[in-house]
Amino acid sequence: MKILFIGGTGNLSYDTSLEVLSQGHELYHLNRGLFKDKTKSALQGDGPTIEGTSLQNNPLNDVHQLTADIHDEPAVRTALGNRTFDVVVDFIAYTPEDVERDIRLFSGRTGHYVFISSASAYRKPPVHHVITESTPLVNPFWEYSQNKIRCEERLTREWRDRSFPMTIIRPSHTYSKSWLPTAWTSSDFTVAARMLAGKEVVVHGDGQSLWTLTHSRDFAVGLAGILGNRAAIGEAIQITGDEALTWDAIHYTLAQALGVEAKIVHIPSDFIAQIDPDMGAHFLGDKTYSAVFDCSKLKRLVPTFRTTISFSQGIRESVDWYLKDPSRQKVNTHIDEVIERVLNAWNRAMGVL
C-alpha cells in the first residue's frame, strides 16, 4: 500500500513507521522535515540524536519525505501535488479545525483516513472501570479531550453523510524508548531526576487506581493491522495493551529501574487542581480514574495484536536510553516547580511545615 503519515517521527508514529516499512509498504511522511535536520545537527555536536539514530543507519531513510507545515494548507497542497494514497493517518490533529482541513485535503485522495483520537475522551468520572468503544465520550474537565470528542463527531458526520472513509483510533497512555511514563509527564526526565536526587514525587489519590500502559512497538502492530482494513472503516477502535498497573506500581517500577527508592507522597487530585488548575484538568480529565480496556474489537480485526513488552521491560529500555547520554535528561522546569508548589501546599495543609 501507499501510505501517508502526517507527522511520522513522534511517540506513536516512529515505531508505526518502522512496522509499516517492515511490511513492505511505501511510506510517506508529511511534516516540517525536522527529523533529519535534528539528526544531522546531533552528528555535528549540536544536540542529541533522535531515538538514538544517525543519518547513516537511520531506519527511516526509506521514507519518502514531503516537507510542509500541515497548518499551511496551500503549502501542503503543493507538497502533495497530484499524489493519491491508499491510507492517510493524521497523528497530529487535535482540533475540529484540523479535521476540517484534512477532509478538504484528502476527500477523493485516499481510500482510508485514520484519525488518532484519545482514550481520555471516554466518560469522566467513569461508571465502570472496564472501557469499550461503546463507552460514552464525555469529559467535562480537560479541553484536550473535549476537542478530540468534537473531532470524532465531525468525522462521524462526514462518514455518515458523505461516506468519507474514516477510522477513529483511541490509544491510551502509549510510551516509547524515549519516554518515561509518570503521573505528571512522560516525554522528559523530570520525575526521574527527582527520584535520582532523593526528592519526593507526587502520586495522585491513594496511588491504587489502575492505569494501562502500552509500548509503542505493540501499538504499532495494532495500528498497522488497521491500515487499509475495509472492516475498520466507519469504526472507532481502541488500541491499548493488556497490562494494568496501579500508579504506585508504575512509580516504584521506574524507581527500581533507576536503582533508587521512590519517595511517594499521595495527594488528592482535587487538591492538585486547587494549586494548579491546568494540571488539575490533566488529572481530573484523565489519570485520576482507573482505566482498563477491552480490546476484543481490535483483536478481531488484527489477530496478531498482543502485549509483548511488559512495563518492567519497557521502562528499563527507556531508563537505559536516558542514562546513556546526559544531554537527553531534560527536566521540565515548569512541571518541577508545580510539583514543589503542590508538595509545599500539602505539607502546610497537613501541618508538616
Image (cartoon, grey):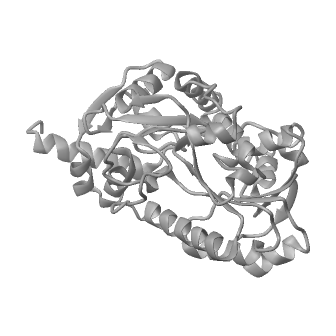
Question: Where on the picture, by quarter, is residue 246?
Answer: top left
Residue drawn at x 30%, y 45% as measured from the top left: 340
Q: Nearer the viewer, residue 24 or 225?
A: 225
351 relative to 254 in the view: left or right = left
x%, y% of residue 227? 75, 50
x%, y% of residue 290? 36, 39
Question: Where on the picture, by quarter, is residue 70?
Answer: bottom right
Please indicate, yes or no, whether residue 72 appears anywhere in the rendered image: no
User: Relative to 165, is 75 above or below?
Assistant: below
Quadrant in the picture for the C terminus: top left
x%, y% of residue 320? 61, 25
186 relative to 334 in the view: left or right = right
Q: Nearer the viewer, residue 147 or 349?
A: 147
x%, y% of residue 213? 51, 35
Residue drawn at x 75%, y 64% as measured from the top left: 32
User: Relative to 194, is 40 above or below?
Assistant: below
Please indicate, yes or no, whether residue 212 appears anywhere in the rendered image: yes
User: Relative to 121, is 21 above or below?
Assistant: above
Farthest-out residue, left: 351
Residue drawn at x 33%, y 48% as measured from the top left: 126
86 relative to 263 in the view: left or right = right
- Tell me how many marks there are: 0
Q: Nearer the viewer, residue 13 or 346?
A: 13
Farthest-out residue, bottom: 74
